[in-house]
Image (cartoon, rainbow, N blue to C red):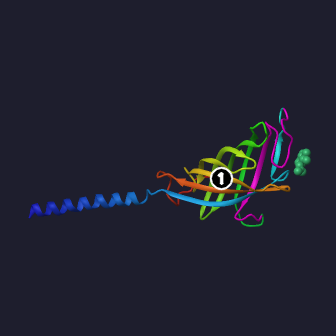
C-alpha cells in the first residue's frame, strides 16, 4: 500500500513538472508583425534643411541634397497613400547627406506607432537612398514594442511636387524575453 501511494505521488509530481514546462513553453513562441504605412513629407512644412553643406558637389533638387546637408523631419504616417487617411504613426528624425552625388544619406528616426492594438515607438538607424528602396535596421523600441528587432523598408512612391510620399514596410520581431502583452513601458 505504501509503495502504491509513493508511486502515485511520484506520478503526480512528474505530471505537474511536465504541465508547468508546457505552460512555460507556450508563452515563448516568436511573435512578429508585418504592415505598411505611407510617410508624407512636405518641404518647409514637415521637413527642413537646418545645416547647409560645407562644399556643394551637387545642387538641391527633388531627389538630391549636397554632401553634408542636415535635414530634420516630423512626418505623418498614414494607412494609405492618401494624406487624409488615418494617421497610425509619426516619424521624427534627421538625416545627413553622406554620398558625394547627393543621393544617399544616413538617417535616424523615432517612429511612434498605434497599429493593430500595439502602442509605443521603434527607433531606426541606417542608410537611405533617395530614389531606391532602402532597409533600415530597427535598433529597439518602447511601450508594446519594447526589445523589438527587425527592419523597415522605405520605398519612394511619389517624388514630384512639394509633398513626397514614401511607402514604409515594417518587419518587426519580438524576442522570447520581451515583456508579455499588457506590460506598458514609457514611450
Ligand atoms: C524652403 O525654404 C528655403 C529657405 O527659406 C528656401 O530657400 C527654399 O526655396 C524653400 N523650398 C521650397 C520648395 O519652398
User: Is 70 situated left or right of 125 in this image?
Assistant: right
Give the extent of the magenta segment: 55-82
| Extreme-bottom residue of the structure | 85
- Nearer to me, 88 or 168: 168
Task: Using residue 133 as the reference point, say whether residue 55 is left or right of it.
Answer: right
Q: Position of residue 71 (x, y in %)?
A: 79, 44
Determine the residue positioned at 84% across, 32% down: 55
Q: Nearer the viewer, residue 163 or 1?
A: 163
- Name the spot of residue 79 as percent of width and height, x first: 69, 64
Per the picture, the main secondary structure of the magenta-coloured stretch is: loop
Q: What residue lies at 19% left-to-right and 61% top-to-bottom? A: 9
- Residue placed at 59% from the left, 64% from the top? 117
Q: Which residue is mark 1?
A: 153
Horizontal and vertical percent for residue 26?
40, 60
Question: Residue at the left extreme?
Answer: 1
Quadrant in which residue 145 is drawn? bottom right
Image quarter of residue 184 = bottom right
Of all residues, the one furthest to the top in this rendering is 54
Q: Count the marks: how many?
A: 1
Amino acid at each position: 500500500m505504501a509503495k502504491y501511494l509513493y508511486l502515485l505521488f511520484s506520478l503526480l509530481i512528474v505530471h505537474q513538472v511536465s504541465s508547468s514546462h508546457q505552460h512555460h513553453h507556450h508563452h515563448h513562441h516568436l511573435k512578429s508583425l508585418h504592415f505598411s504605412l505611407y510617410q508624407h513629407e512636405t518641404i518647409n512644412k514637415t521637413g527642413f534643411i537646418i545645416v547647409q553643406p560645407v562644399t556643394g558637389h551637387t545642387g538641391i533638387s527633388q531627389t538630391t541634397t549636397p554632401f553634408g546637408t542636415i535635414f530634420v523631419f516630423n512626418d505623418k504616417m498614414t494607412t494609405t497613400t492618401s494624406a487624409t487617411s488615418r494617421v497610425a504613426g509619426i516619424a521624427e528624425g534627421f538625416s545627413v547627406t553622406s554620398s558625394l552625388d547627393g543621393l544617399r544619406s544616413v538617417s535616424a528616426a523615432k517612429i511612434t506607432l498605434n497599429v493593430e492594438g500595439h502602442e509605443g515607438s521603434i527607433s531606426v538607424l541606417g542608410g537611405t537612398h533617395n530614389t531606391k528602396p532602402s532597409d533600415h535596421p530597427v535598433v529597439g523600441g518602447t511601450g508594446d514594442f519594447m526589445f523589438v528587432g527587425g527592419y523597415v523598408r522605405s520605398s519612394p512612391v511619389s517624388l514630384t511636387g512639394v509633398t513626397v510620399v514614401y511607402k514604409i514596410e515594417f518587419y518587426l520581431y519580438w524576442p522570447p524575453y520581451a515583456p508579455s502583452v499588457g506590460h506598458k513601458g514609457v514611450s
